[in-house]
Amino acid sequence: GLVLLQGTGELGAALEFTLGAERLLLGAKRPLIGSASFCIEFSGTGNKRGPALLDFYHKMPTEFQGQEGTRACSQGEEYAAFAGQVDLGSQIRVHVLLGPQAELTKLPDPSKAVTSRSCIAPGAISSAELLDLAENCRTCREDLGRALLLLEVSSMQGGLGQLEVPDQAFALDLVAACFCDTEGLLGLPVDALRAELQVWHARRPVALGSEPCVKYELYAALRQSSPSAAKAGLEEYVDAALLLLKTAALQCAIALRDSMRLRASMSDEDLEGCYTNELRRAVSERWGSAHRHSSVMEETNCIVMEEHLRPDDRVDTPAPMPEDEVERVMAAAQQCIHDAADFTLRHSDLLDDIQAGMSDEVFLTKLRHFRARVPPMKRSFEPEEAEDRTFSHQCWGSELFASLDSGLHTSPRLVLESLGRGAAPYKSMSTNSKSGEFFFFSSDRRFLIKTVSEDE
């Protein structure tokens, strides 16, 4: 659920929920002077009711349970509550996960960090781990859909902060329409998302229409007409979409846990029967085979490089970088590029599996729209010895680059061939670049790699 307090000046509230014999207290403050705070606490059961609501409010800590912006949790005898995605700025907005403690345990899966709580907390688990989880679910279409939803919700939350409100609404709609508004994909009970879907549909601005695959132009147009009113309505719509997706992710995490426990007790023959379609195949051929550079491309690259490296009397030429520094940056670039391209290939293959296993044309239209429009996904990768990954990094919208020219020259497969960990070493370029950044060529001279500064 969402706790949202809006208003000018000093702001404060305390809420009490009764869960069976337990009491859950939530409090938030934003004083005129000092830091805002939020507190969540189970207090008393049965006849031992604990402090009155007003006393709880007055005794709240001056900071958000120790540090502003961190997550807080509280456990009662039967239930547990977790506060995350905390915004204590001009308005107080806190997402709260509440449920029986038994439902907030780890999934029995090698991806040790996957819990029903971490699945809906931004950045709590890396995209690479969630992709591994999805690949372990390929024998069952419903489990695969659930695991992919966990991946998309996690990546989507990482990218939303970079967007304006209309773009947030559009991006969330792409995911929600594809995964949550399609009957049968996730295999959840009929009532599992009914309330959240009703709120999501009810808060949809009239200007966006009711088509399952909406046009981005409709969202962008809301900026032009009555911006303040449009923003207020869209913010409520974004909240509704986020709650729908988080609830769906939580339901999927619980369903995956139960399904994995069942599958652990099944024979190989039973497992094969979970998914009748023959979906274990190589990466889709749609990426095409390798294409050689044309002379036109080489000439264009030379023109671009000549222009960028042209000396500029107004800027001092930077000193050459030490060789070990060049090698370090080269290795880091190769790892980042390999992870992003490999992720895109594997992720696309899983979506192909979903697409091949569904016959509902309405869903297929939504899925094709989702894949074509490329939501702003932030894919995260953490250090992992098995993958020879030594540091964490992020990748933004890697799917976008896979279709720049229909995969003719920039498909993930070609990127891996030229720039991945199995490719020949990059060729360093000693330049008098005005920016002082690093330049590398792939050994086959298909690609140029250039680092950029934060400002660029």
Image (cartoon, rainbow, N blue to C red):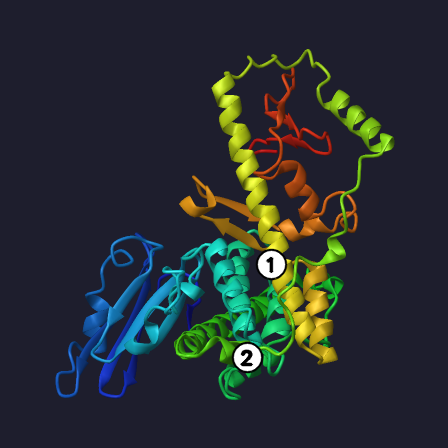
Residue position for label 1: 347
Residue position for label 2: 274
**x then y, percent, for residue 46:** 16, 87
Q: Quadrant of the C terminus?
A: top right
**x then y, percent, for residue 319:** 55, 12
> Relative to the observer, which residue lies in front, 363 or 259?
259
Q: Is residue 218 above or below residue 344?
A: below
Circle 1/circle 2 CB separation < 8 Å = no
The amino acid type found where label 2 is placed reads: Cys
Quadrant position of residue 314: top right
Mark nearer the N terminus (1 vs 2) = 2
Residue 222 numbered tag: none
The amino acid type found where label 1 is placed reads: His
Q: Is residue 316 above or below residue 34?
A: above
> Relative to the observer, which residue lies in front, 13 or 149?
149
One can see residue 411 in this view: yes
Front tag of 1 and 2 = 2
- For mark 2, give the secondary structure: loop
Quadrant position of residue 163: bottom right
**x then y, percent, for residue 140:** 54, 75
